[in-house]
Amino acid sequence: MQAAVQAAEKTVVQDLDHIVINTLTRIGAAADLFRALGFILTPLGRHSLGSLNHLMVCEGAYLELVGVPETGKQRADVLHSARGLNGLVLRSNDAEATHAQMAAAGLDPSDPVSFSRPVDIDGTETEARFRTVRLPETQFQAGRVYFCEHLTPDLIWRPDWLTHPNGFAGFERIVVSSTDPATDAARYAALCGSQAAANDGGLRVPLGGIDIDIVAGSAPAFATLGLRFASLDTLRDAAMSHPDAVWSDDGPACGTLNVPSLDLTLTCRGMG
């Protein structure tokens, strides 16, 4: 009991940690596509839970391609989740404290889970380690929502992975399609420790590093993801020449990138 009280009293960091794109068993093809679009990807990671990943890292957060191997151990929550935008992950600086806070908010969190993956740094193999606290899909039906505590953050945010040829610089917003926007906005506000406010016909919940926009839709889903780039020139040129990318200009420094094979829609804004 004393430990639970102490955990609940700790200050919990509630910022964006990463956004997940589920590739199912096609992570190799997805990685080739994102490299062709000008992203720097980390080497293929193999989680102890039975999943694969590549990261596209920026200051403070990252975009993750996740998948499962075609044979062998397969991580169930990835294998049985929708392809495309599939995960909203918040930062935790203490998984136990996060669990206590989410329980106090009535969000029914799972117990913290520990896992790892090998990382090769300059020819030396070490281990990236994490702890996660997941929220149930009955509360967040659009996709997987959870917290991640990084026990080895220096193995993720490395200078050689932070600079992308296409100028990828961060996140703007994720749009959540909802059949009950008011209820979902209240849950996301409790998740983020913030307040929902009206925004462009929907509701916006601010989170450090990204805005969560909840809009009325026919089914729960993470609908679109907004990214920021230093300039759109490189991304636009690469997308227009790639067979699995559909680019449309939305303005002088705005565009939409669709990837049909991943059921993925990205809105992109240049800051230059």
Image (cartoon, rainbow, N blue to C red):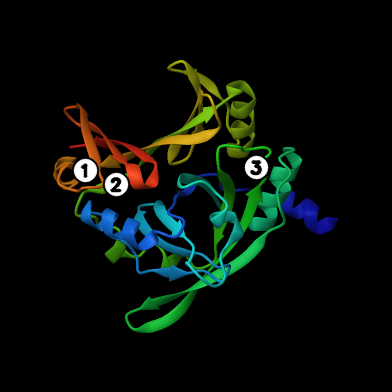
Q: Is residue 229 left or right of residue 2?
A: left
User: What amino acid type should be assigned to the residue bearing mark 2?
Assistant: Ala
Amino acid under label 3? Glu
Q: Residue beneath label 3, please?
A: 137
* 184 vs 124: above or below: above
Is residue 61 or residue 21 the one in the foreground? 21
Residue at left offset 59%, top offset 55%: 77
**Circle 2 Cα neighbour tier, 10 Å, few/some/many (<14 / 14–19 / ≥20):** many
Q: Are marks 3 and 1 in contact (CB under 8 Å)?
A: no
Estimate how packed mark 3 is, as few (under 14), some (14 to 19) or many (20 or more) residues with alpha carbons within 10 Å: few
Gap between marks 2 and 3, in whole Å? 30 Å
Is label 3 in a helix, a strand or a loop?
loop
Label pair 2/1, CB-CB below 8 angstroms: yes
N-terminal of the pair, mark 2 or mark 1, is 2
In the picture, the disc for residue 230 is: 1
Q: Relative to 19, say whether 94 is above or below.
A: below
- Residue type (three-letter) at the residue carrying disc 1: Ala
Q: Secondary structure at mark 1?
A: loop
**Residue 54, x across and y down, in percent:** 39, 62
Could you give the CA–CA distance between mark 2 and mark 1, rounded to whole angstroms?
6 Å
Identify the element where label 2 is drawn: strand
Above or below, comparing residue 249 to residue 128 in the picture: above
* Residue 10 appears in the picture as rendered: no
| Mark number, residue 169 | 2
- The numbered mark at residue 37 is none
Image coordinates of residue 255 in percent, x first then y, are 24, 33
At x 35% / y 63%, what residue is drawn?
A: 28
Q: Please state, as top left, top right, bottom left or bottom right, where the N terminus lies in the image.
A: bottom right
